[in-house]
Amino acid sequence: MPTASTDIELWNAFKKGDQESFGDLFRRYYPLLFQYGTKLCPDINLLEDCIQELFLDLWQSRSDVQLQSVKAYLLKALKYKIFKIYRDKGKRSTSEVTDDMSFEISHENFLISQNDSKEKTAQIIFAIQQLPDRQKEIVYLKLYQGLSYEELSEVMQINYQASRNLFYQAVKSLRKLLVRE
């Protein structure tokens, strides 16, 4: 994955109208956005439409938003777009949509060394599935996507300390669940 400065350079070039940089951003982040979006939206066609709409909106607006993390910005924007569609379909508030949507983590989401047994892998996946959705989401974003606490706070719409606390609680819950096994 590219460095943040490379991402920011691409972002700035795109904001100035560079179509090639825009295409590079799309190609670089589409797989990540798709993978993250499948955790929030089971309808693949709807998800692909949301990602394409997101990039279309970005190209059309090109506002002078100052970013610290392109990855966090795009993940957050996709999450908003998905929530908006679900809200508009059901005419419900964002908090209801958030409460109703579950965050799913599958076996493929975690790379576990070949030395670990299948039983240990199954125990870890089972423990993760027992976590509340917000904790599953933060574990996925922090461990699998490698987001920093600053990026986590932006994507999950919580402050920096709350992101640290939520991740700590998730790890603490996982430890308790794994000790019981």
Image: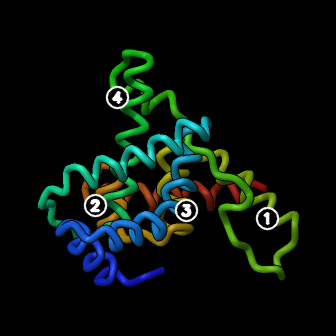
Is disc 3 placed on a helix, strand or loop? helix
Q: Does residue 23 appear in this view?
A: yes
**Given the image, on which type of amino acid does mark 3 rest?**
Pro
- Comparing marks 4 and 2, which lies closer to the viewer? 4
In this rendering, position of residue 69 left or right of residue 48: left
In this rendering, position of residue 40 left or right of residue 109: left
In front here: 128 or 50? 50
Sequence-first disc among 3 and 1: 3
* Residue drawn at 19 percent across, 50 percent down: 61
Sequence-first disc among 4 and 2: 4
Is disc 4 placed on a helix, strand or loop? helix
**Residue 119 occupies quadrant:** bottom right
Q: Which residue is mark 1?
A: 121
Sequence-first disc among 2 and 3: 3
Q: Which residue is mark 3?
A: 31
Sequence-first disc among 1 and 2: 1
Question: Which part of the image, by quadrant, shows the C terminus?
Answer: bottom right
Q: Which residue is mark 4?
A: 94
The answer to whether residue 112 is above or below residue 36 is below
**Given the image, on which type of amino acid does mark 1 rest?**
Thr
**Given the image, on which type of amino acid does mark 4 rest?**
Thr
Mark 1 neighbour density, 10 Å: few (under 14) some (14–19) many (20 or more): some
Is disc 2 placed on a helix, strand or loop? helix
In this rendering, position of residue 142 left or right of residue 60: right
* Residue drawn at 44 percent across, 48 percent down: 52
**Given the image, on which type of amino acid does mark 2 rest?**
Gln
Question: Looking at the picture, how far across and down is residue 129, in whole percent?
Answer: 67, 47
**Residue 44 occupies quadrant:** top right
Q: Which residue is mark 2?
A: 161
- The answer to whether the residue labelled 4 contacts the one labelled 3, judged by CB atoms less than 8 Å apart, is no
